Image: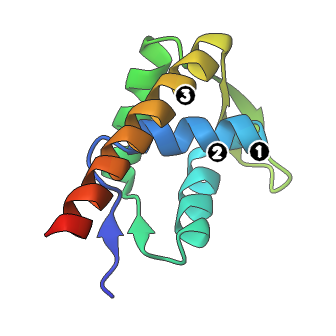
Amino acid sequence: MRKQDALQGSLPLLVLKILARRGPLHGYGMTAHIERMSDEVLRVEEGSLYPALHRMEEDGWIRAKWVTTENRRRARMYEVTAAGRKQLEAEEGRWRAVTAAVDQVLGQA
């Protein structure tokens, strides 16, 4: 199966879930985690991830700070906020409703 970009609209859900479970991560760590956890089916491009992270930060769902990594490189670490946890609940609910509806249609087709 060909690698595909994350489904449109699901990237904030995936990012919030990963940060809620794993704690602070940098962008590359999020991308690697999404690809690994999806058995390489989902692929997140930098051109999609970083604009999404900026929007989520502006919305108050995540916060970021610059840190120096073990390799002595500067990286921007992201973590979920209380507002982001609330948004995660809403996003998960919507996702489950949509996937249930698609499953229902597929089962009746």
In this view, the residue in front, 21 or 45, is 21
Report the Cα–Cα distance between label 3 and label 2.
10 Å
Q: Which mark is residue 18?
A: 2
For image coordinates 43% across by 13% down, the residue present is 58
According to the image, label 1 marks what residue? 22
SS at mark 2 in the image: helix
Point out residue 82 in the picture as x, y percentages from the top left corner: 67, 12
Report the Cα–Cα distance between label 1 and label 2.
6 Å
Point out residue 59 in the picture as x, y percentages from the top left corner: 44, 12
Report the Cα–Cα distance between label 1 and label 3.
14 Å
Q: Which mark is residue 88?
A: 3
Q: Which mark is residue 91?
A: none
Point out residue 36 in the picture as x, y percentages from the top left corner: 60, 71
Residue 58 appears left or right of 30: left
Displayed quadrant of residue 28: bottom right
Q: Nearer the viewer, mark 3 or mark 2?
A: 3
- The residue type indicated by label 3 comes to Leu
Q: Is residue 75 visible?
A: no
Tag 1 near tag 2, CB within 8 Å: yes
SS at mark 1 in the image: helix
Position above or below: 57 against 29: above
Position above or below: 39 against 76: below
In this view, the residue in front, 68 or 1, is 1
